Image: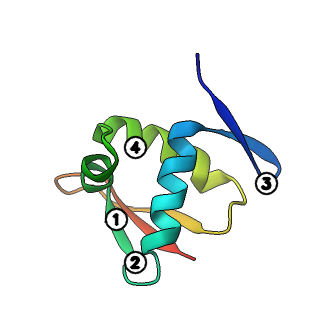
């Protein structure tokens, strides 16, 4: 069962909310984020991060998420 948290026009799962909060907290000092490093910080796998980033990429959550590269782990370009 997935817990959801209201966020903008759609509900986010708890994992998506944690990822979004992490990105917002770090976007002022960093632009590029690797899935595996986000996962390491949040106790998630790189696959879990990637799966949930696609939801953040398509929604309006106060950050712009763009899939950027694939070497050693998917890299995401984030703009707050």
**Label number found at residue 56:** none
- Label 2 belongs to which residue? 31
- Label 1 belongs to which residue? 33
Indicate which disc, 2 or 4, sits on the residue closer to the N terminus: 2
Q: Distance between the residues labelled 4 and 3?
A: 20 Å
Q: Crowding near pointer 4: few (<14 within 10 Å), some, many (20+)? A: many
Asked if the residue at tag 1 contacts the one at tag 4, i.e. Cβ–Cβ closer than 8 Å, the answer is: no
- In the displayed structure image, the side of residue 49 where residue 21 appears, left or right: right
Q: Crowding near pointer 2: few (<14 within 10 Å), some, many (20+)? A: few
Q: How far apart are marks 4 and 1 (CA)?
A: 11 Å
Residue 72 in the image, given as x and y percentages of width and height = 16, 53
**Image quadrant containing the C terminus:** bottom right
Q: Name the element at disc 2.
A: loop
Q: Residue at x 34, y 65 (%)?
A: 33
Indicate which disc, 4 or 3, sits on the residue closer to the N terminus: 3
Location of residue 64 by image quarter:
bottom right
Residue 15 in the image, given as x and y percentages of width and height = 50, 39
- Label 3 belongs to which residue? 8
Q: Name the element at disc 3.
A: loop
Q: Crowding near pointer 1: few (<14 within 10 Å), some, many (20+)? A: some
Indicate which disc, 1 or 3, sits on the residue closer to the N terminus: 3
- Label 4 belongs to which residue? 49
Residue 71 in the image, given as x and y percentages of width and height = 20, 57
Indicate which disc, 4 or 1, sits on the residue closer to the N terminus: 1
Residue 60 in the image, given as x and y percentages of width and height = 72, 60
**Image quadrant containing the N terminus:** top right
Q: How far apart are marks 1 and 3 (CA)?
A: 23 Å
- In the displayed structure image, the side of residue 74 where residue 24 appears, left or right: right
Asked if the residue at tag 3 contacts the one at tag 2, i.e. Cβ–Cβ closer than 8 Å, the answer is: no
Q: Name the element at disc 1.
A: strand
80 relative to 14, above or below: below
Q: Which residue lies furthest to the bottom in this view?
A: 29
């Amino acid at each position: 069962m997935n817990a959801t948290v209201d966020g903008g026009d759609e509900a986010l799962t708890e994992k998506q909310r944690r990822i979004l909060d992490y990105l917002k907290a770090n976007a002022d000092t960093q632009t590029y984020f690797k899935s595996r490093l986000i996962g390491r910080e949040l106790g998630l796998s790189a696959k879990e991060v990637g799966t949930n980033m696609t939801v953040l990429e398509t929604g309006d959550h106060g950050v712009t998420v763009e899939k950027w590269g694939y070497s050693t782990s998917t890299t995401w370009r984030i703009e707050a």
